[in-house]
Amino acid sequence: MAKLTLPVGDRDHAQGPASALVTLVEYGDYECPHCGAAYPVVKKLQEQMGRNLRFIFRNFPLSSMHPHAEHAAEAAEAAAAQHKFWEMHDWIFEHQETIEDPDLLDGGKSLGLDVGKLTKDIQSQSFLSRVMEDFQSGVRSGVNGTPTFFINGVRHERGPSYEELHAGLLAAAGKGESRPPYSPQTRSW
Amino acid sequence: MILPPGRRAPDFSLNSTPDQKVSLSEFLGRSVILAFYPADWSPVCGDQMALYNEVLPEFKRLGGELLGISVDGIWCHLAFGKDRKLRFPLLTDFEPKGAVAQAYGVYAPESGTTGRALFVIDPKGIIHWSYLSPVGVNPGADGILAALESIH
């Protein structure tokens, strides 16, 4: 059973509290259509599970297949340096068909990023090593394509549909012994 | 049965282009990764060869030379390699069909293809690690990296 070799930590971009019952890590490629399809699925899971779910996105660009994926990943990391990672992450997945460099800059502009800095960061590949660090951690963890999900550090072996991911998350939440059991009916979050 | 670690890797000489052959014996002194896969043009994003193409620098850093092998013909390999921008050779186990896969114990007669199998061969030509994956499962690269690291 494949395990996450680089534990979730301060270097990661996270949504949801560290105390959440379950942590979902996605290794994704911004140009991969399957990741594009998983994007609204994760949004729906977050909506459904609220503060019981923490979501982390790590980069896994398959560059020779998806020529824009690496720059898109670097652009999202550059946006993170301007405290807008998730805004850029969402923008890219919502504009997956048009993510050439000028498009990424337009996107950054629409989000209120410092476009001069974003341009420089993309051109000089300021965040390439960060992206490759994510990639290598994925390879070492047995990521074999995108998207690959890990639930509480263990690879999710089933598909990326809402039903399959939700079932995996519920199963992992049920295993947390030191914490109160998760009930999908609870609406008090 | 798939050849286990400790066995000498059977030598072979297979075409990588219409007029070029690659022999395993050329690689003595270096580690070799043999990636047997069922067919070119697998229609998924998680394509195993595309993944290995991205991990190639890490394989090389650890001293491993990667060779892909399937029963597809050489023209098929060339078109596939070009389309996927692969930066490593694809060898054709085409005539007699699957003979090298059989020598390594990874031929799948029911489909007439090689199985999905990985071998890491040490610089002395001895199999250091081998793994047969279920045919529908991309085995990733983590096992290869761990094997390469454990050679030295």
Image (tube, coloured by chain):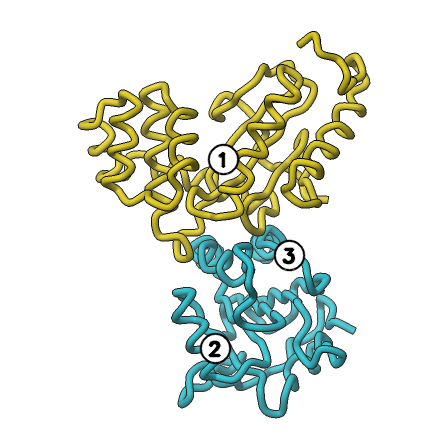
Badge 3 amino acid = Pro
Which residue lies under the disc numbered 1? A58
Query: Which of A160/A3 is in front?
Result: A160
What is the residue that sits farthest to the top in this orientation? A188
Task: Tell me, by letter, which chain the rendering colours cyan.
Answer: B
Other residues around mark 2 within 10 Å, as few (<14) / some (14–19) / many (≥20)? many
Query: In which chain is the residue bearing label 2?
Result: B
Which residue lies under the disc numbered 3? B139
Task: Tell me, by letter, which chain the rendering colours yellow.
Answer: A
Q: Which residue is drawn at 65% across and 69% down?
A: B127
The reply, left or right, for residue B4 in relation to residue B97 is right
On screen, A177 above or below B27? above
Q: Mark yes or no: residue B152 visible.
A: no
Badge 1 amino acid = Arg
Looking at the rendered structure, whether the residues under marks 2 and 3 are on a common chain is answered as yes
Q: Mark yes or no: residue A160 visible.
A: yes
The reply, left or right, for residue B16 in relation to residue B102 is left
Which residue lies under the disc numbered 2? B77
Other residues around mark 3 within 10 Å, as few (<14) / some (14–19) / many (≥20)? many
Q: The C terminus of chain B lies in which quarter of the figure?
A: bottom right
Looking at the rendered structure, whether the residues under marks 3 and 1 are on a common chain is answered as no
Q: Is mark 1 on a helix, strand or loop?
A: strand
Q: Position of residue A83 (x, y in %)?
A: 36, 19
Q: Residue at x 27, y 39 (%)?
A: A103
Q: Is mark 3 on a helix, strand or loop?
A: loop
Q: Position of residue A40 (x, y in %)?
A: 54, 33
- Identify the image quadrant of residue A174: top right
Badge 2 amino acid = His
The residues tagged by marks 3 and 1 sit, at their Cα atoms, a distance apart of: 20 Å
Q: The N terminus of chain B lies in which quarter of the figure?
A: bottom right
On screen, B73 above or below B138? below
Q: Is mark 2 on a helix, strand or loop?
A: helix
